[in-house]
Amino acid sequence: MLANKKILLCVTGGIAVYKAVALVSKLSQAGADVKVVMTESAREFVQPLSFQVMSHNDVYTDTFDEKDSAVIAHIDLADWADLIIVAPATANVIGKLANGIADDMVTTLLLAATSPVWIAPAMNVHMYEHPAVLRNIDRLSRDGYRFIEPSEGFLACGYVGKGRLEEPERITELVGRFFGQHDDRPLLGKKVIVTAGPTLERIDPVRYISNFSSGKMGYAMAEAAAALGADVVLISGPVAIDPPAGVHIEHVESAAQMLDAVLAHYGSADYVVKSAAVADYRPKAAHPHKMKKKEGDSVLELERTTDILKTLGEQKTHQCLIGFAAETNDAVAYGKGKLQSKNLDWIVVNDVTDPGGGFGSDSNVVTLIGKDGTERTFPAMEKKRLAGELLALIAAKGSDAQ
Ligand code: CTP
């Protein structure tokens, strides 16, 4: 499955180092050529010999231990790899990488790397939730690093929570998908961000402005993307439906929070499906206390929110951007305008007055418009089936940018 694939595993110091030995074994069994670099702290937990035996390769630990005088080891290793995985990744290595610090073999070669780098954190739940760690993860995500999220469960420190290194079998499966092995699902190994539901803009602690979006279309898009093989990050406003299995969900409330959440994943995303009904305006002042009624009329001053999709369009490098437009008249003409003004690859347009679809409904009638000139109207069908058909067509065509 992974024959001819060269994988460099960077092992940093945590109790989960023992699982990294199993990971080398799994990757090697799958046919990959695996080389291992360890930090000094990692060597406190497991001897390099274990990795050497499992990988049938030399293990590197010291930047200045040049095994081959013809090359410089940290540059040579970085160039050699098709994929680099940091597992387990401690808070320390994440912090160093986020700040460009290179003070040992692992951090030095990571700065020299040009291949994709995946980071699989493992640490105490409180460390994982520390604002500094979250900030560093956020920064690295924006820089294009891909994270293999830790799972929840019993931690070696005695706590129960998020922080366990993902299982070696699962990481190996993700690597297989990344190299396009396994099966022929069109979004295999692709990272897809889906936004869904309404946003909620607070007026005061008990009141807000929102809209009637049910989130059904967005959740259907997330489910369809996962079924087509994608790694899905579903960023959802407040809705009353359960998330589909197998997607990573992040809950947000306001347009500003949705913008931050999307940007955190944007650098490493291949597709963004922007099905959320984002508020265009929010109250200018959010009152800290409940506003009291007064005699006479009241005027609520509103200010514009950031247009998330437009921002993504402006910052687009390689991503395929899919917008949604809910219209009540001249739907296709308005959709084409938004496709262009927001620099999208695709837009899904629907006339919300159509009896076959709209907010809250289980079905939808849409026209998919591509910047390549594709224009296809789908008959009324269940949102889940429609989501699958839309994504299959989009995945088959890709985007011009890709
Ligand atoms: N969108 C966004 N951020 C906003 C507003 C909208 O990302 N602040 C996205 C939606 O998720 C959707 C698309 O933009 O994919 C909708 O386009 P938009 O022109 O904003 O639609 P409307 O808000 O309905 O705009 P208009 O009132 O101009 O028709």
Image (spheres, rainbow, N blue to C red):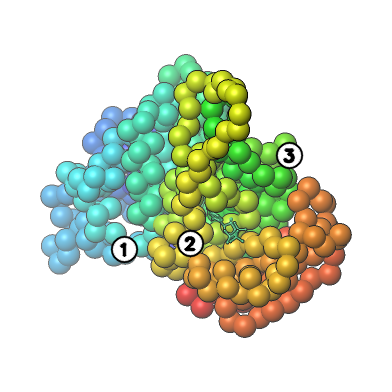
What's the residue type where badge 1 is placed? Thr
Q: Quadrant of ligand 1?
A: bottom right
User: 66 or 86: nearer the eye?
Assistant: 86
Check the image and name the residue furthest to the front: 296
Mark toward the start of the polypeptide (3 vs 1): 1
Q: Which residue is mark 1?
A: 114
Are there few (<14), some (14-19), or many (20+) residues within 10 Å of tag 3?
few
**33 w.r.t. 296: above or below:** below
Q: Which residue is mark 2?
A: 310
Cα distance between the residues tagged 2 and 1 = 29 Å
Residue in the picture at 35% in, 38% down: 135
What's the residue type where badge 2 is placed? Lys
Cα distance between the residues tagged 3 and 1 = 41 Å
Secondary structure at numbered mark 2: helix
Q: Which residue is mark 3?
A: 241
Secondary structure at numbered mark 3: loop
Q: Quadrant of the N terminus?
A: bottom right
**139 w.r.t. 285: above or below:** below
Are there few (<14), some (14-19), or many (20+) residues within 10 Å of tag 2?
some
x then y, percent, for residue 250? 56, 40
250 on left or right of 326: left
Secondary structure at numbered mark 1: loop
The mark lying in front, picked from 3 and 1, is: 3
Task: Please say if the residues under marks 2 and 1 sit with CB atoms less than 8 Å apart.
Answer: no
> Does residue 185 appear in the picture of this structure?
no
